[in-house]
Amino acid sequence: MAAGEGGVVGAGQYEEPSGEVLGRAAEAFGLLAAPARLHIVWLLAHGERDVSALAEQVGGALPAVSQHLSKLKLAGLVRSRREGRRQVYYVGDPGVVAVVRLMIGQLAEQEQEQEQGPEYRHGSRQVYERGAGPVRRLRGTGA
């Protein structure tokens, strides 16, 4: 398998991920496959929150959100610390947040393009870089 065929490319070299790395990635993606957990990670990417605030924003029952947080915490995607009587949750893995922001930003951009039609794609959202054609910036990713 060549690097362009799905391998991991780093600094011009090809390294195939170990089975352990692939397994951990699959577990993380599996956890993020639930819309409520994905929403929780998205919210925490924008600031720390306690379980009550998360339950209110996610629209879920407190025990259900607490259970989601426990799973995310066990996987290392979310961490917590005690502030007085409340537990405050925050992002445990900034790399995962980058993936979540990229995916959600890309899908939100596609949704907006579909709603606004083809003229949106050729309007002010195009950015030209030196020596390249138009490049779309991904909303909410800083990219």
Image (spheres, helix red, strand yellow):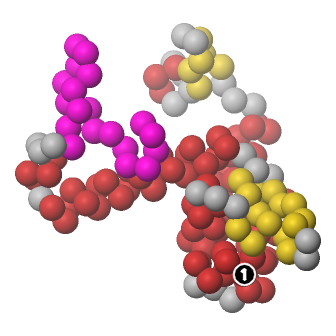
- At a point 79% along the width and 39% down the height, the residue shown is 20
Residue bounds of the magenta highlight:
125-143
Residue at the extreme top: 12
On the image, the x and y values in percent for residue 17 come to 69, 29
**Horizontal and vertical percent for residue 65?**
72, 78
Query: At label 1, which amino acid type do we have?
Result: Ser
Where's residue 104, x and y in %? 45, 56
User: To which residue does mark 1 refer?
Assistant: 52
Residue depicted at x 52% and y 20%: 3
User: Does 43 sit above or below residue 45?
Assistant: below
Left or right side of 126 for 17:
right
Residue at 58% x, 78% y is 57
The quarter of the rendered structure image containing the C terminus is top left
Residue 122 x, y percent position in the rendering: 11, 43
Q: Nearer the viewer, residue 48 or 77?
A: 48
Work out whether residue 41 can be spotted. no
Question: Is any atom of residue 45 visible in this view?
Answer: yes
Residue at 59% in and 78% down: 58
Image quarter of residue 31: bottom right
Q: Quadrant of residue 54?
A: bottom right
